[in-house]
Amino acid sequence: MYLVDTHTHIYAEEFDADRDEMIRRATEAGVGAFCLPNIDIESIDRLYALCDQYPGTCFPMMGLHPTSVDSGYKKDLDIVRTELEKRKYIAIGEIGIDLYWDKTYLQEQVEAFEEQLRWSIDRNLPVAIHSREAFPYVFESLYKIGIDKLRGVFHSFGGSREELEEALRCPGFSLGINGVITYKKATFRDYLSLAPIERIVLETDAPYLAPVPYRGKRNEPAYLTAIVQKLAEVYQLSEETIAEKTTENARRLFGICS
Ligand SMILES: [Zn+2]
């Protein structure tokens, strides 16, 4: 089995004590590639350090996370844009809108999101979208900037049936499925199979959102297999097929081959 973790923050300090061990466990579980979304200005050096240590295995994205957007966001975006010139990236991410924690900077979040969407079109890169209690705003921005020119992934998808249908109408977009699908209250499991398997990619969002039976603990990419198992049930396909299809989808979307 060869799996791709399309959204994982394994450069985070939560892994400082055992990062190489954790990556070895992931490799043993079949996880062969890690897509690393940036968060903010502080996370950039950690992200680069890990990608330099594991070239061809860890792939960087660059972007400013919506919960890191405040009144001073333009200065941070300038730094992110400068970084974009320095390296090869697989995506702009993670970007989006988050109204769960705080609605104070909604306007700024929308502006930062739309600016980074434009960059993705200019550079012909996919986007990793974080949307929390914000799908109407996210879709509005996607259509405003140009849905036909954009592609990417709705990371940590767990939306309503209507939101799923709306997401599927965005032709270049996939759904990133993580440990949430294993939670008892995850109602989206009941209609997820409306999405063709060709539109699904795997992610952990480590260190967050560990799947059952690790829920509440630190998440790590080796646990991707629990998500494969659950998707196999939902789609009535073998785990092998889920692995093959989602890996193919991830490679196509992010342009990674290894
Ligand atoms: Zn994330």
Image (cartoon, grey):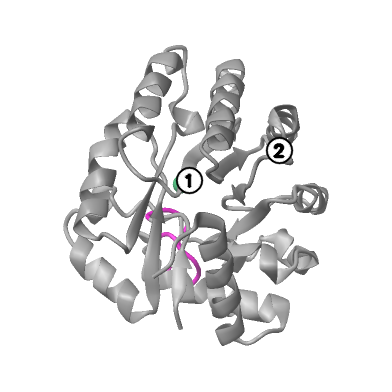
| Residue 211 covered by magenta stretch | yes
Q: Which numbered dot is residue 202?
A: none
Q: Which of the 4 image quadrants contains residue 113? A: top right
The amino acid sitting under disc 2 is Phe
What is the magenta range?
A: 207-216
Horizontally, is 79 left or right of 104 in the view?
A: left
Please provide percent x and percent y for residue 129: 57, 42
Q: Which of the 4 image quadrants contains residue 101? A: top right
- Tell me the residue that label 2 is attached to: 135
Q: Is 10 rendered above or below residue 4? A: above
Q: Is 96 rendered above or below residue 243? A: above
Q: Is 148 rendered above or below residue 8? A: above
Horizontally, is 33 left or right of 23 in the view?
A: right
User: Which of the two discs, 2 and 1, sits closer to the camera?
Assistant: 1
Main SS, magenta region, reads loop
Tell me which label, 2 or 1, sits earlier in the chain: 1
- Tell me the residue that label 1 is attached to: 91
Query: What residue sits 54% from the left and 78% below the top?
Result: 243
Q: Residue furthest top?
A: 71
Horizontally, is 168 left or right of 7 in the view?
A: right
The image quadrant where one finds the C terminus is bottom left
**Residue 202 in view:** no
| Residue 171 covered by magenta stretch | no
| Residue in front for this viewpoint, 109 or 211 | 109
How dense is the environment of label 2, judged by Cα within 10 Å: few (below 14), some, or many (20 and up)?
many
| Residue in front for this viewpoint, 87 or 26 | 87
